[in-house]
Amino acid sequence: MLEKEGEGWGGASMRNTRQALVLLLAGGVGSRLNILVEQRAKPAVPFGGIYRIIDFSLSNVTNSRLQKVGVLTQYKPLSLMNHLGAGEAWDLTGRTRGVKILPPRTGAKDSDWYKGTADAVRRNIDFIEANPSEEVLILSGDHIYHMDFEVMLEYHRSKKADVTVSMMVVPKSQIRHYGAGIIDDKNRIIDWEEKPEKPRSNLASMGIYVFDRNYLLEALARNKDELDFGMHLLPWAIENDNVFAYPFYGYWRDVGTIQAYWQANMDILNPDSGLLPEQWGIITNVESSHRIYDWPPARYGYKAELHNSMIAAGCRIEGTVVNSILAPGVTVEKGAMVQDSILFEGCTVRKDGVVDLAIVDKYVEVSERAVVGYGDGHDVVNCASPDHLYTGITVIGKRVTIPSGITIGRNCAVHGFTTGDKFPASGLNDGETLLQDGTVK
Amino acid sequence: MLKTTTLAMILAGGRVDELDVLTYGRPKSALPFGGFGRVIDFPLSNLMNSEIEQVAILSQYHSYSLINHIGTGAAWDMLGRHRGISILPPFIGSTHKDWYRGSADAVHKNIDFVQFHDPEHILILSGDHIYHMDYDHMIRYHQERDADLTMALIHISPEEAHRFGVATISDEDGARGGRVLEYWEKPESSQAEWASLTVFCFKPQVLYQMLQFNQGQRSFEFGRDIIPYMMRAGYKIYGYKFCGYWGYTRTVNEYWQSNMDLLGEKPLIDIENWGFRTNLDHRDIRDFQPTIVGDYGTVTNSLIYNGCRIEGTVRNSVLFPGVEIGRNTLVEDSVLFFNNVVGHNCTLTKVVADVNTYYGDHVQIGAGGKSSGVTVIGWNNDVPDQTTIGHGATIWPELNDACWKKKVKAGEVLR
């Protein structure tokens, strides 16, 4: 039912020198990612070994030849700002190019935190005014996808739309997580449902909007109580003005839950999934960890065994790695086993240690014979966060030391910086959470 | 005011014929090494770690790959108001119009550059050696002894003496070094047990005088001309004893062996702990995703950087970014540079392969037992299906399809 190709938005040959201004919304807490967002914003969560989630949106911007980006931050922005640097990695430095961090600012009133997506953009109207453009492209910093925005902008122009919303077909059972659009035969959106329980459409908004700049400024000025694009601003625009759906058919994932995040990482190991970061030209900032020396090539020992895994530079593999993603500097010692897991930078799995179905944050040490992800209790949901950890995945926070011989069950969480002496001798049972002070929930 | 205390000059000009097709389009110092870097990264990383921040590179043979590799110098933190790397190619001046006629001539031609920096010490290094050294220790020794020249020396067996500049030294400073008593450049036979590493620290005024004097001679080399003259003239020359690993890469076999020294349980080249840096912008290696080892992949005792895809078996090998190994293919005892793509059912044994070569299916290369020679594949080739290449063979770069044959014999040169 989506019109596949319309007049006048042929693609690369139609490139226009007009430059849209990009606003990248990177402020979300992303709390469903649980302890992975204890110390960082969701867009800064590592992904696919060497990337961070925001690299996908930013690289799409660079590869679409857009040159001016404002990144709206709010929640724990330090690691994100560090990662963005001056933008050189994405070729966003130069006389006409730039990436600007836009943190919340105290206005006339105190306590002016961003109250929603539209509110965040409204607070940065001065940035939009200072960078005149025909269109403003609004992106979310927390999706994994590959898209040429220039094609979408051409489409927007050819439709003479006020707003264009990028949309894709998802299973009806999933639509309740998204904004859903109902379109006519010209792809014009005629009705909108935000996170509907009983959907009338299978077209989900990807949180990517092209606004005609003047239209955006007027819409934001109209009603200051409209805080969110999906909840307030879009429904109003659909009712009164020209809002079009831009059909998207490629790989796109919202990695906002532990399960979705894990699955999208695993998709890298399966080329048929369509997730191909290197081919897509996804760029990351390898300097952001401020290492003085480079990670050398990964070293594979005499007893290394690997199956279907992604191994970054700086790893040392002496044991067994199956269906896993290893970030730079991960060590897997002899007799150790890593399976169906994602290990962030600098983790160590000591001799005869096991990591099974887990996401392990940076610089965690799994001591000898310790087991992360033990037993068959995949159905025992996490007591503290039943909505986050319920598919069997165990999550270990940054710089945790798991003492030797300790066993951690399924759907467990260990908060960051928990030292070895805080672990109960009996380990953690399925569904338990260990806090930094040693409290088990 | 911040001032340069030590200026380092890296001699990176030469092409060495024994390295053959690997230096077809690049100087030896730009030869890939260690799975992601280049040979010159060793002296550059040593300089960075020794906090020497003004560096000049003297280069005249196919400099582009080197210029590209050095970039702004930021990779080694040598970009700033008082930090920098300059590449100094030969040039035509009012008084000279030659290429660099030798290492000493290269430095002499750039004496303006050296004097502009007005350093306290001038460090002269070779860009072709693989080693880890804190130059600061040697410079301190040089200062303490108030030497005119201090050279780093390594212990060798007398049979090897004919390949090096060799010296005998007094034992006045024991393990640190001593005064150089005698010096020979590549003697036919000698009992001298200390060989020069081509790491020299000069007192600037002495160097200026020596270079000036040398211009009236017929040969312009530090080892062959300058040092013997200084010995005869009674200058104060000290030897600084270096006892770490020193990788010499003059021949294909030595180059291959140096790569193998990266491997094993306790590698001689400890690249993880040497503080090694390269320029990740060169060939965009920063943009490669991590390596994927597939369901049928096996990797043992090997170094593999990002950007590879392994579906076959890799043993005792070093793989650079962009290498792909197909199913049922075995690669062992080999070094594959950037973007070698190997098909299915192939065997590559003891191969050094330059960049950008495609291998069809059922290709057999090498395999002639333990003592067999290294097979070298030049860059940008397309090896047809079913080709067999014997051990010790050399394949020239960029062969066109008509040059290829089903069987290349052991030791044969295909060009």
Image (cartoon, rainbow, N blue to C red):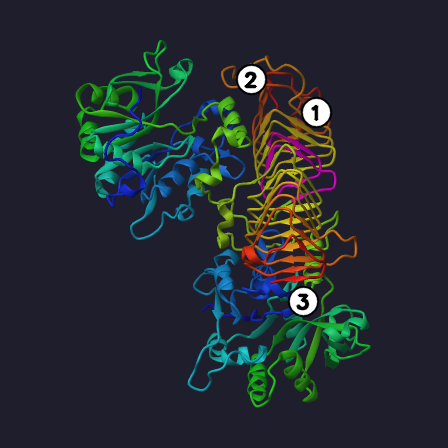
Q: Find the distance from the CA under tag 3 to the CA under tag 1.
A: 53 Å
Which is more foreground, mark 1 or mark 2? Answer: 2
Q: Which residue is mark 2?
A: A391
Q: Which residue is mark 3?
A: B250
Where does the C terminus of chain B fall, quadrant-wise?
bottom right
| Chain containing the residue with disc 2 | A
Residue B144 seen in render: no
Q: Measure the C-alpha gap from mark 3 to mark 2.
A: 58 Å
Mark 2 element type: loop
Looking at the image, is mark 1 or mark 2 earlier in the sequence? 2
| Residue in the picture at 81% in, 73% down | B158
Q: Residues within 10 Å of mark 1 (few under 14, many from 20)?
A: many
In terms of image quadrants, where is residue B177?
A: bottom right
Question: Residue A406 bears which disc, if any?
Answer: 1
Please report, as a chain letter, where disc 3 is located.
B
At horizontal 58% and vertical 88% (from top left) the residue drawn is: B213
Is B12 part of what is drawn in magenta? no
Q: Residue at x 44, y 42 (%)?
A: A281
Point out the stretch of residues depicted in magenta: A299-324
Q: Which residue type does callout 2 highlight? A: Thr
Residue A235 horizontal/vertical position (percent): 24, 19
Circle 1 chain: A
Q: Amino acid at mark 1?
A: Ile
Q: Residues within 10 Å of mark 3 (few under 14, many from 20)?
A: some
Q: CA distance from mark 1 to mark 2?
A: 22 Å
Amino acid type, mark 3: Arg
Residue shown at 52% from the left, 25% from the top = A263
Quadrant the N terminus of chain B occupies: bottom left
Looking at the image, which is closer to me, A16 or A234?
A16
